[in-house]
Each structure stands twice: as structure tokens, then as C-alpha cells.
Image: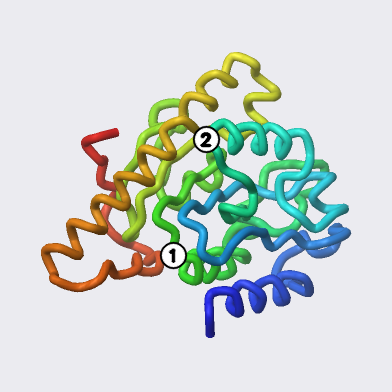
Amino acid sequence: MSSEEILKEVALEVSTCAKCKLCNGRTRAVPGEGTPTAKILFIGEGPGYHEDKQGRPFVGPAGQFLDELLASISLKRSDVFITNVVKCRPPNNRDPEQDEIAACDDYLDRQIAAIQPQVIVTLGRFSMTKFFGNERISVIHGRARKKDGYICIAMYHPAAGLHQASLKDAIRQDFKKIPLIVAEADRMAAEASTRSGNQPKPAKPAQKHEEPPQQLSLF
């Protein structure tokens, strides 16, 4: 199956999913959206009120801020892929619970494997945990690391900037690093290709229980 076909298959399964209790209160599931060939994958936490109504990720106030952030680095939604660790809205926008995250984990893993992005940007601490364990976002935000075969960068959730104005500048500065990180990913792939004498190979799908994230010296 092509990347596009896999993403459509995941979206169809998500739309009727009943793996956890979140299905009981949803209006619409929110599988994610964007290009199947995205270099950058953004992973948030979970849908909110507006996302639940529209079935699309990041369409409320936090999404408007995300659009602004993307524009600041000359990107549009259609250039990237955006999803969440849970695909249905938690009641009253509460934090997603561990069993709910686990229920959606296979969907997210399949999306990552289908897209094979160069860079994964985690938005908020729940998506950060998937790649960085129990580290603190206040300590590692904006730092790129190699984990599970991907270059990952942890960032504050855009909603944090709306609730705490002092974080807005930090989020904007972190976003400005993304083009540099993509360029570094391109350079690393080119070097690997030169060493092997082959075309660059796509990144491997995310694997569990691997070594801790490796800090990239340039970031």
C-alpha cells in the first residue's frame, strides 16, 4: 500500500474506533491531516471542542496560533502532516489518560511509518513522552534529538502560549529552528547516501524499547 492509502485506512478505522471510552463522547474522530510525503510531522495531544465538531486537528485558537507559527517559517498546513496522540476529544478537554493514549498508539505508529518524516515535532508533554520519556519539556524544548530513526524536537503546545503569554516568544523561537533541523536532516541523509553509494534510504518506522534519545550536537 502507498503512504496515502495507509493514511486513509487509518483514518477510516479511527472514524469508527471503539477501543477506549473516548468514543462515547465524541462528535467526530480526528485522525489528522496533511500530505503523505511531509518532511515534518507535528504530533499534538488531543482534539478540543472545535476539532471534535469539524473532525480536523488544530482548528481552534491553538490551531490559529499554529498556522501563524507555520507561516513564520514559510510553511502551510498542506506542506506538513498534523495529528495527535489521541484521536477523540477527552471530556472537557482534560488530559488524555494512559489507557486512551495506548489505545491510539498503533494508529500513530502506522501514521509515522507511512509518512516517514525527516523531522517529528512533538507539541506538548503527552506527545513528547512518546519519544523523550519522563524528561521535562521546560528543559528540553527546542532541542533536536535522534530517536527511533527520526530527528525529533520537543516543543510547547501552542495552547500553552495562549494560556501563558510568557511562553509565546519561546515557542516562536523554537519554531524558527525547524528549517535548520530539516536542512540538517537533508545533510545527514546525503552523507549516508555518499558513504553507502546508494540513494538515501527512508527513515525506519518507530520502534519501541530502543536506546535513549541521542542529542544532536548542532542543536
Q: Which residue is mark 2?
A: 73
For the residues carrying marks 1 and 2, which lies nearer the camera in this image?
2
CB atoms of marks 1 and 2 within 8 Å: no
Colour scheme of the rendered structure: rainbow
Residue displayed at 63% across by 28% down: 160
Amino acid type, residue under disc 1 in the picture: Gln
Please report whichever mark, 1 or 2, sits nearer to the chain's N-terminal start.
2
Could you tell whether 91 is left or right of 63 in the image?
right
Could you tell whether 169 is left or right of 16 in the image?
left
Residue lying furthest bottom: 1
User: Circle 2 — which element?
Assistant: loop
Amino acid type, residue under disc 2 in the picture: Ile
Image coords of residue 16 (percent x, y) = 78, 74
Q: Which mark is residue 102?
A: none
Q: Is residue 198 above or below residue 192?
A: below
The foreground one among 89 and 83 is: 83
User: Circle 1 — which element?
Assistant: loop
Q: Which mark is residue 116?
A: 1
Q: How many other residues sit within 10 Å of disc 1, few (<14), some (14-19) or many (≥20)? A: many
Q: How many other residues sit within 10 Å of disc 2, few (<14), some (14-19) or many (≥20)? A: some
Image coords of residue 121 (percent x, y) = 48, 45
Q: Is residue 97 above or below residue 108?
A: above
